[in-house]
Amino acid sequence: MTATTPVARRVSGGRPPAPAVDRPRRRRRFRRERWTPYLFLAPAFVIFVVVMLIPMGRAVEVSLQDWSPVPGADNTFVGLDHYQRALADPDFRLGLVNAGIYMLVTVPGQILIGLVLALLLHTRVPGRTLFRILFYLPVVTSWVVVSLLFRYLFANEGVLNWLLADGLGVTSDPPAWLDARWTALAALCLLGVWKGIGWTAVILLAGLQTVPEELYEAAAVDGAGYLRRVWHVTLPALRRHLAFVSVLLVIGSFNVFISVLLMTGGGPGGQTEMPLTYLYRQAFDNLEFGYASAIAVIMTVLVLILSVAQTAIFRRTDKEAR
């Protein structure tokens, strides 16, 4: 009997070929297993198309027209006129500058303070669960509530000015925080940092819990102090978490809306307008929906470019670190 017969293959440990009747059944099972993941993804994909892609396509269409919300009105096609107007609009460019300032302050502030909080909450101290809850409370609190709270704090006759004038006696003429551009932006940035550090700390704390203790012990044996262990062990281990947090924070900084609308209203004189508040006024105050849609498309492209650039930079640094 040759080595190619089924008996010889079984004796030698090989598997006999499947019967011919089982092959169609295996093919059907293979097809079913191959398409099963897509069936699970289908509902989410349908929701994404209906909620995101179709409205985005409609926004692009409206941005190319002098669109009117009145049923039956004549919507004149204007091409790229709204985009040219937006790029030359000094008020829109001021909003972009304000959003850039907000991003440069709030993103590093949230990451730095969130990292410090994560390191503190990672240590074994009494009541750390309570502290985690307290630091995360601003995250789950409504933007409307915290915006009204900060507006009350920074009002001309608010808590902060009362403390400066009557409580501490520092000045008899307290500043009007929300009536000047830079102090109003400072108040908005402070709110953004305060509300976001709990979320950042939770993400980084989750990353800290994945760092092996052996790395810290080895660094301690080599004589590394606490700060050097953080620099050489903690930060490299949190590289991907920091990348994730920074990308989402940059996206969120260009989407700031409720706090500006409720605290300053874009004032004084439009000096604290952000892109979304300016878009809102163009659409619902001036009823220029085509122009507002063009601003929305520009902001989408800008945020997409920033996100892709950040992701590429972090991927490159991650490969270099390896």
Image (cartoon, grey):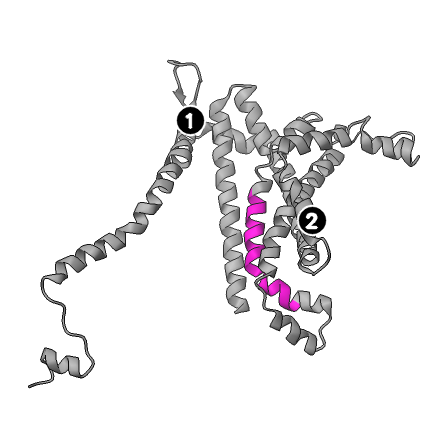
184 horizontally vs 29: left or right: right
**Which mark is on residue 62?**
1
Which label's residue is closer to the chain start, 1 or 2?
1
Quarter of the picture holding the N terminus: bottom left
The answer to whether 35 is drawn above or below residue 150 in the figure is below
Frontmost of labels 1 and 2 is: 2
Percent of width and height locating residue 7: 11, 80
User: What's the distance in space between the residues labelled 1 and 2, CA to CA?
Assistant: 50 Å
Q: Would residue 156 appear left or right of 103 to someone viewing this image?
A: right
Residue closest to the eye, 82 or 218 = 218
Q: Position of residue 95 (x, y in %)?
A: 62, 34
Looking at the image, which residue is at 65% across and 74% down?
217
Amino acid on which disc 2 is placed: Leu
Secondary structure of the residue carrying numbered label 2: helix
Badge 1 local density, few (<14 within 10 Å), some, or many (20+)? many
Residue type at numbered disc 1: Val
Secondary structure, mark 1, is helix
Quick check: is 249 in the magenta stretch?
yes
Label drawn at residue 190: none
Read off the magenta span. 232-251
Q: Which residue occupies the extreme bottom position in the image?
A: 1
Please tell me in which quadrant of the rendered image residue 80 appears.
top left
Residue 199 visible in rendering: yes
Mark 2, residue position = 130
